[in-house]
Amino acid sequence: MRQVFVIEGPTVLQGDVDVRGAKNSVLKLMAAALLAPGRSLITNVPAIADVRIMCELLSRLGCGIDYDADAGTVAIEVPEAPGITADYELVRLMRASISVLGPLVGRMHAAEVAVPGGDAIGSRGLDMHQRGLEQLGADVRLDHGYFVASAPGGLRGADIALPFPSVGATENLVMAAVLADGVTTIENVAKEPEIVDICTMLVSMGADIEGIGTSRVVVTGVERLHPVEHRCVGDRIVAGTWAFAAAATGGDVTVHGVGLDLLPNVVDKLIEAGASVEAIGSEDAAVAGFRVRGPERPRPLRVSTLPFPGFPTDLQPFVIALNAVAGGVGLLTENLFEARWRFVNELSRLGAQVSIDGNHALVTGVGSLSGAEVEASDIRAGAGLVLAGLTASGTTEVSGIDHIERGYEHFVEKLTGLGAAITRVEKPETVIP
Ligand code: EPU
């Protein structure tokens, strides 16, 4: 049997929704825990499949794991000498597994981590991870599908300049450098809030990092780090998903757990689409939030995806879904991943008028989409199809929902709480006799 989401549209989303910690931070915070023996505790952890995969990976490295999905906590008991091998079996399920590479080489001076292949959104190179670790003094070679890294005398500080502000390479190299001998300077680093979150945890573990949140970080290696308790930053992409869902459905949604400071450029685009956006709560990240009220019909958007603080590539499918029902012609330019268009073919099944030219998607808004069966190819594409289904008339059935559940906790329950008619249904697999 396979599971699908069945949506009856159109719907106007209304109400309040809570957002917990960011998938793209928590997985790296869990990897960072490897840098110190003892028990680290991470809070504000979302109940998503990727966290369970990372728990399994760390437990296979010898860590004791206590994950309480309801409470949103994960405790990680790291041994004096964790294992060094991350198997393909887990890495293929979740690319973010690569983030144990830096901490393992930094602390254990050796690692064997399976190389993830390309995926539905692009080829996703790892050359900057490899080259950066080599500059820190590690020998890194590809052996039977694994990065085999070793630095017998430990890593040494180095001057590194990234050709592109890669999120994953920045994280791996900072996590490797915190225990290196000497000073590491990394130029052109990524500045995403998740990077700031990871650096903040590393500093509270005893690391010495300057320039956090800027394009240049200076890491002075220390001999030893200690375990900590750390609260994961809220998920700005999940928050942005709810914001676009409110804007596209003409709804009124209040999001709790993420402040507007994490959504620069996104807020401007929501307003340009005709939505009103209002900050609520206080400066305290735990209670920060915002309210989005959508227009009767959105105005089309022109958006280019860029590294933070630019418009996030992970919100790209929601812009296209909104443009699909907007009053006019919109344009989306994707600058990070070359193959993030599989979603567009599915959206066309709902009646969207999209044409792709290189890295541009030209979208002519139609009065209304019409429900159909569609398939999710990645996390954001899946959530984007659900959003399109909410605006469509009739029944939309989204398969491939395991992708969505990798990154969105209690998705059906949260949508139902906002007034959507969505259910999870079991369907038999197609069998060809
Ligand atoms: N790149 C290289 N070589 C490298 C590293 C990256 O060529 O060594 C290229 C990639 O192929 C890609 C671009 O640089 O075209 C950006 O990659 P980056 O390293 O910045 O992204 P990532 O670390 O692989 C994270 C998020 C993605 C998010 C991107 C961009 C995690 C687990 N994933 O990926 O999130 O889209 O940053 O912000 O943190 C998602 O959550 O659905 C998702 C895909």
Image (cartoon, rainbow, N blue to C red):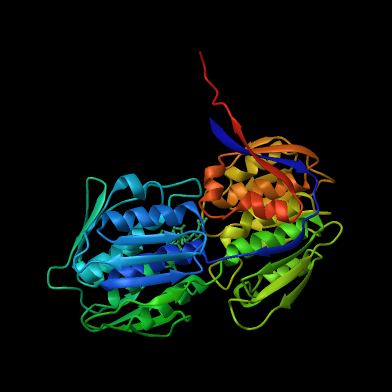
Res. 212 image quadrant = bottom left
Which residue reaches farthest top? 433
* Residue at 75% in and 70% down: 291
Relative to 59, is 338 on the left or the right?
right
Residue shown at 69%/53% (left/top)? 415
Q: Which one is nearer the viewer's eye here, 63 or 254?
A: 63
The x and y percentages for residue 205 are 34, 80
Residue at figure coordinates x 65%, y 59% from the top left: 241
Q: Percent position (x, y) of residue 362?
A: 70, 51
Count up the numbered dots: 0
The image shows residue 349 at horizontal and vertical percentages of 70, 36
Vertical relation: 388 (above or below) 58: above
Res 250 quadrant in image: bottom right
Left or right side of 340 for 109: left
Residue 234: x, y in percent? 56, 70
Specify whether 392 is left or right of 171. right
Q: Is residue 378 visible?
A: no
- 47 relative to 132, above or below: above
In depth, the one of 51 and 106 nearer the eye is: 51
**Residue farthest along the right direction in this orientation:** 296
Report the front residue among 104 and 183: 104
Q: Compared to 77, does 206 lie above or below?
A: below
Q: Residue 299, can we see it? A: yes
Q: Is residue 364 left or right of residue 400?
A: right
